[in-house]
Image (cartoon, grey):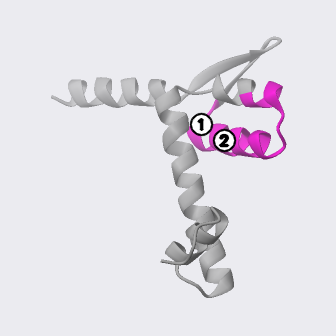
Amino acid sequence: MWGRVRKSCSRFLNAVRAEVNHGRDKRTHNLFEAAAAYVSACAEDDQDRIDEAAGWVSPEALSFGVNELACRAVIALARERDESPRTVARTLLGLPAA
């Protein structure tokens, strides 16, 4: 039974990590590193960095990481502004107050 659990966890971890070969060094990026690099590259409109970060993890993992980053950013801004996360999210998207 533990072998199945270990194998399942291993598959999951392999799905959210990708090895990138930089010369002779191999570096493993996690989904949060990929999300941070991807979002910052999108904000700076740097297509080369967008493509690089998108290749570090699976598309599903990148989507999860970007979603998690967005949630954390909205929560941090809401605390900073002393507003609700809903208000902050709508303001960032240019939507009228609900």
Question: Residue type at mark 1?
Answer: Asn
Q: Residue furthest top?
A: 24
Give the residue pinned by disc 1.
30
Question: Residue type at mark 2?
Answer: Glu
Image quadrant occupied by the N terminus: top left
Q: Position of residue 60 (x, y in %)?
A: 46, 32
In the image, residue 84 above or below residue 37: below
Residues at circles 2 and 1 in contact by the CB criterion of under 8 Å: yes
In the image, residue 98 above or below residue 46: below
By secondary structure, the bulk of the magenta-drawn segment is best described as helix
For disc 2, the neighbor class at 10 Å (few under 14, some 14 to 19, many from 20) is some
Q: Position of residue 91 (x, y in %)?
A: 63, 71
In the image, residue 43 above or below residue 83: above
Q: Nearer the viewer, residue 4 or 93?
A: 93
Q: Residue at x 45, y 30 (%)?
A: 13
Q: For the residues marked 2 and 1, what is the alpha-carbon distance in whole angstroms? A: 5 Å
Q: Position of residue 25 (x, y in %)?
A: 77, 18
> Residue 9's quadrant in the figure?
top left
Give the residue pinned by disc 2.
33
Q: Is residue 95 left or right of residue 40?
A: left
Query: Magenta segment range?
Result: 29-50
